[in-house]
Structure formats: structure tokens, C-alpha cells
Image: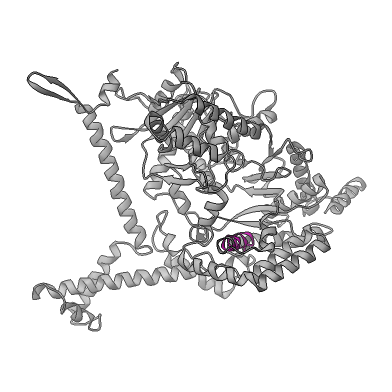
Amino acid sequence: MAEAHQAVAFQFTITPEGIDLQLSHQALRQVYLSGLRSWKKRVTRLKNNVITGVYPASPSSWLFVVIAILATMYTRSDPSMGLIAKIQEHLPVSVQCRTVVSAVLFSTLLWFSLIFTMRLCLKQLLSYHGWMFEQHGKVSNTTKIWAMVRIFSGRQPLLYSYQGSLPNLPVPAVKDTVKRYLESARLLMSDAEYERMTTLAKEFESSLGNRLQWYLKLKAMWASNYVSDWWEEYVYLRGRGPLMVNSNYYGMDFLYVTPTPIQAARAGNTLHACLLYRRKLNREEIKPVILNVPLCAAQCERIFNTTRIPGEETDSLIHWQDSEYVAVFHRGRYFRLWLYHAGRMLSPREIEHQIQHILDDPSPPVPGEAKLAALTAGDRIPWAQARKEFFSSGVNKRSLDCIEKAAFFVALDDDEQGMMGDDPAGNLDRYAKSLLHGKCYDRWFDKSFTVVLYKNGKNGLNAEHSWADAPIMAHVWEYVMTTDCFQLGYTEEGHCKGDVASSLPPPTRLTWDIPAECQERIERSLAVAQTLADDVDFHVLPIQDFGKGAIKKCKISPDAFIQIALQLAYYRNRGSFTLTYEASMTRLFREGRTETVRSCTSEIHKSSTISNKSAYVSISLCLMAMTGGGIDRHLFCLYIVSKYLGEESPFLKEVLSETWRLSTSQTPLQQVELFDFVNHPDYTTCGGGFGPVADDGYGVSYIIIGENMINLHISCKHSCPQTDSHKFGADIKKALMDLLELMSPEKPDPSRAEQNHLKNSKKDL
């Protein structure tokens, strides 16, 4: 009870002599320190806004311009060509001050003009993408001039320094998009189907397409990005099906190493590392991702303190400026865990102590509490209705607000997971399924991300997709994993390092009053989610036989190599090619997110052997998508405009209803410098994955680790008799090895049996 009294700033009693006011100085000190921390954050945010606003110049450069102008005037020269004198005429100050004040005002105007000119030049330079299409060693004169981008990049940038200089996503010509679409569809259609689709496409191009394009160009002139807001709303927020499996994705822990077997200790380091990342994010100390040119960092703004709120027609994303606690789930109970005390961040050892307090808490959940999160796992409309009816007031609203306003969500699982035991491969698959959907009620699927901590010290995450794409969350998780192991570390006993302050208040149990009718709705949502989760067939396949090093010897892009192997594997698995979705980013542009690469190309089918031409086409398609020349986002936006105008387009309707039976995505390793695969080869990230997009298709996520490893995450559905994640995984591995054997420049002369094997592989292609 002592801690509870300390949480109250003052108490009072009424006596015959009057009111006896009793102040708690310790509680008031906590309030003061918390407010001081908030004001420090505001000052830091203001300072960073100023620094980012004048980039690529610096605030100190203003003083340099002022001194230069005053020094020039001291020599009786007029660098303003009469403007300073004009300014003097309108200044209501004394004669002695007019000259200095007018010079300072002119210097400031000149400084802003120089900044505007530099940012305009930087934006023009960042709009040039020709360098991406040039071969190594063959650099054009235009690209050599473009290298001036480094001159205009100025000093060391903050995270958001480049945002104002990034170009807007261009709107492709309707003619070009239609042409590229027909080229991508040719392999997948019969002659009659292709002829029919060509007729529809030409009709659209010559009539309705131009009218819709005019509205898109108008939007592109007005908005930062003509795609992203519609993509977020219509693809994600208006989806009425479950987020779990269908939208959310997961990230795994180290594959071979568990730094400590103590659950609370792993939680201490993991949560502290998340806070360190958030602090760097708030201070904009995270380096912007630069691939010769900077990538848009707008998605980073909503990593923390963000939740998705259900609605009957559409959901909404809510982001708060700050949150000093996390919401924790354990054995059906919910807790609020404060991560700051006395104006400072809790140490890993203190967080471990608090987590252990939750693990040792014997109190049972109240009726309806244990499976409450199933509402976030089921369909969105029932959840929106239940939220409005049962969680809009009283104790339920306060507890729900606590979860939704938390920095992120934490799930403490009683299960043990990882590649372990007598069946390491099967346990790895179960580990992936656990992160993807858990028990359907032990993850808050609406939060921006949920950190999952298992009983044996393994961890992972489940992330909501609408606020950002996987590379953003992967960047966070790379930092968290490496900081946990290589910077924070553990004692010999496996506990976090440091001491525990004696004045820490314990975690607070959230309270609920869930009526029987609400409990029935929770059970219905759980039944929907459980059916979906049970249908997921998942397989994680680490390949250690070869990796990027061996593929590069074939003089081919590793990503293109894997995409070709996926096409070969699917053809062997199903006997035909299929429409293939490969995710590519458009973050070269302001507020860019993703674009689709249709990686099933006619060049693969035409080649009797795998040649560099098919790889070159795959790379070219990816580069076109990255530089704003993709197909699907443009057609998607044209379709949205047609709906606003009440126009029907048979061409757009058919394109938008196509089924992606093979959905693929590469998770890039972005912070290679944080890992040491030479001295610590066991500390290998396993990447992450997602559920199948189509009921009769596959979802494939892959990550290329170092020079000698590729990890695959393969998903499909048990309910489809034509799909099998393990069989498809074996087909992919065989296709990769066959392609490597076909293309390797160092392969020995094959025997007769090997010649027949190679001939059969070529025949498949």
C-alpha cells in the first residue's frame, strides 16, 4: 500500500479546525521530473525542426551571412544594390540602428533565398535516377554531373533532413502503364484472353483513361504523394477482414542463439533497447537510410505510440506524441508498466525486476479479460461495434485507453519456442506460427507492434501493417537485437546488468467490467480468428549450403536469382506460371511506400537456359518500380478516381480483381555494421514472414544473410489441396541449387547423369 500512497500527490482530511492538507513531496517530485522530461523533449523537437527546416544549410550559417554583409558595408560597398536603403525607409527605429537592422533583415532574406536555391537544386538532383540503370564501369556524363548531389547534401543530416528535398512521385503516362501491363500479362493468358484484354486496354487508354489521368496529375501537384494516402486507406484501413494473418507480419529472434534463458531478463534488455531506439528517433539521431540517395523517413514517425482504431466503415490510425509506459499481457491479465521513473528511463535490471513482478502475480483474470484481445484478431465490424457499445465509458474505456496509448504492447508467453529439441525444424515452424497469430487472444493486433517474450528467453515481434512497411520495423528490430546482445549484455547468471531503485512503484493491473453479452462477442471473434489461424500452413527454411557469395560468382543479382528460382519452383510445383507479386519500395520519393514488381516475365519462359537476359529484365522491372514507373499503383489510383466519378471501367475492374497466387518479399539487412558474421556467426537474424495472400497461393519472404545463408519463410493454407509449404520449400531449395549449378562459372565437366539432370532443368524453364 505504501507505493499506492506515494502515487498520490496530496491527501486531505476535514477536521473541526478546517481542512488538513497533506502533500506528498516525493509524488510532487515525480510530477516535476516527468514534466521536466516532457519539456526537454519539446525543446529538442523544436531545435530539430529548426535544423531540419534550414537543411542543407545550418543555423550558424545565418551568422556568417550577416557578418559578411556587415563587413562588406563597412568597406562602403552596397551588396544589396539599394535594397538595404529601401528597407531603412520603412523601419520605425532610430537612425543609429537603422543601418544595422536593415542589414540584418537583408542578410536574413538573402540567407533564406540561398537555402531555397540549395534545396531546389538538391531536389532536382534527387529527381535524377538514370544512374540506377547504368552498368558498372560505364558512367555517363550526366551521372558524373549528378554526383554534385554530395555538394548540396551539406553537413551531417538528421533523420528527417532530406524530407523537404525529396521529389514527388511522378504520374506515369497512361499509354506507358497500359503497355507495360500487357507485356506482363502475356505469359499468363491464352491468345484469346490476351486479345480480349488488349481490346479492353486500348479502349480504356483512348477514352476514360485520359480523363482519370487528369485528376491524378492534379492530385500529384497538390499532394506530397498521389498514392500513399489512398493506399493506406483503401488497401489497409478499409479492409473489414481480420488483421491477424491477412495483414500483420512477424519478425524473429536470432536463429541459433538465445542470449539468456531468463524470460524477465530478456524482456528487460529488449524493452530498454526499444526505448533507446525511440530516444534516438525523437532526437532524430538515427542516420537516414542512403542508397546513393536518401530514402524517405516519413514512416518512422508512427513506430511508437500508435494504434489502429476499428470503425464500422473504415479504421483510423491514431498517433500520440509520447507515452511513458507499455501495456503488458500475461496469463489473461493486463498491466500498465511504467518505463520512466524520477524523470529517467528505467535500466534493463529495473525493467527485469518489474517484469518478474508481473510473472509472479498470482491474481486470476476477471471474466472476459483473458480472451479480450480476440476482438482485435477477428473481423473489424464486430470489434468496432463492441468497442462503441462496451468500451466507450467507465472502467473499460480507461483500461482500453491505457492499452491504445501505450508506447507498444508486450506479450509474456508461457510457451517455449525456437529451433530446439528433437524436432528443430518443426519447432521453428511452430515458432513462426506463434509469432504470426499466437493463441489469437494473446497479441493486441491493433498496436503498431507487439513484442513477444517466451518462457525460455526467446523473443520476436508482431507488427500491424497499415502505418508502415516491413523494412521500417526491421530497422528497429535489428537495432534491438544487436543492442540487447552486444551492448547491454547479461551477467554470468543471465540477469540484466545494473541495480534496482528501491522506490520503484510496481506495475498496475488494469481493471475491466465485461458483461456477458460482450463475452459472447469475444468468443465469436475468437472462433473466426482460430479458424483462420488453424488453416495456416507455415514453413521456415534456413539454407546454409550457399548464399550471396556463390550467386555473385554467377554475375547475377542475388534478388533476381531468387526470383527466377521461385518461378521455376512454382512451375514444378503447380505445372504452370502464375501472377507474381514482388514488393519493391518507392521511398526515393516523398512519403513513398511500395510498388509491385510483376516478376513472372516472358523472358523466363522464352529462355531454354537461364541467361543474364532474364535476370536483367527482373532487375529492370524492379528499378522501374522504384523510380515511379510501376504498373499497379498507377492503375489502382486510376480505379479509385473512377469510383469517385461513378465511372465503370471493365479494364480496371479486371486488372484489380487479379489473384496474386505467389506473393514474395525480400527483407533487406539494413544495418550490416551492427552484425559481425565473422566473429559471431551464430548471431544470425532469421528475418520474418507473413501469411498467404490468396487462399490457393503462397506467401514467400526471404532474407539474404552474409555471404553463405538464405532464410525462407513460406506460408499457404491447409484448406487448399494444391498447396504445401514444406513441399514448396523443398522445390525452392532444389531450384536454387539447380540454377547455381547451371550458371556457376566454376562447375566441372558434368558426367552423363549430370548432363541429363541439367537438360531436364533447362526443359522445365
**Residue 7 x/y as whole percent:** 27, 26
Q: Looking at the magenta stretch, what is its main secondary structure?
A: helix
Chosen colour scheme: one colour
Q: Is residue 215 left or right of residue 50?
A: right
**Residue 490 x/y as whole percent:** 46, 28
**Residue 681 x/y as whole percent:** 60, 37
Q: Quadrant of the N terminus?
A: top left
Picture residue at 40% right of the left edge, 55% below the top: 158
Note whether residue 148 is visible. no
Q: Quadrant of the C terminus?
A: bottom right
536, 80: nearer the viewer: 536
Q: Is residue 640 magenta?
A: yes
Picture residue at 46% right of the left edge, 20% below the top: 366
Q: Is residue 488 left or right of residue 520?
A: left
Q: Is residue 507 magenta?
A: no
The quadrant holding residue 500 is top left
Q: Is residue 573 left or right of residue 335?
A: right
Q: Which residues are magenta?
A: 630-642
Q: Residue furthest top?
A: 362
332, 258: nearer the viewer: 332
**Relative vertical location of residue 700 with respect to residue 170 in this rendering, above or below:** above
Q: Is residue 389 left or right of residue 579?
A: left
Q: Residue furthest right?
A: 752
Picture residue at 78% right of the left edge, 54% below the top: 743
**Residue 60 x/y as whole percent:** 28, 62
**Relative vertical location of residue 532 with respect to residue 283 in this rendering, above or below:** above
68, 197: nearer the viewer: 197
Note whether residue 693 is visible. yes
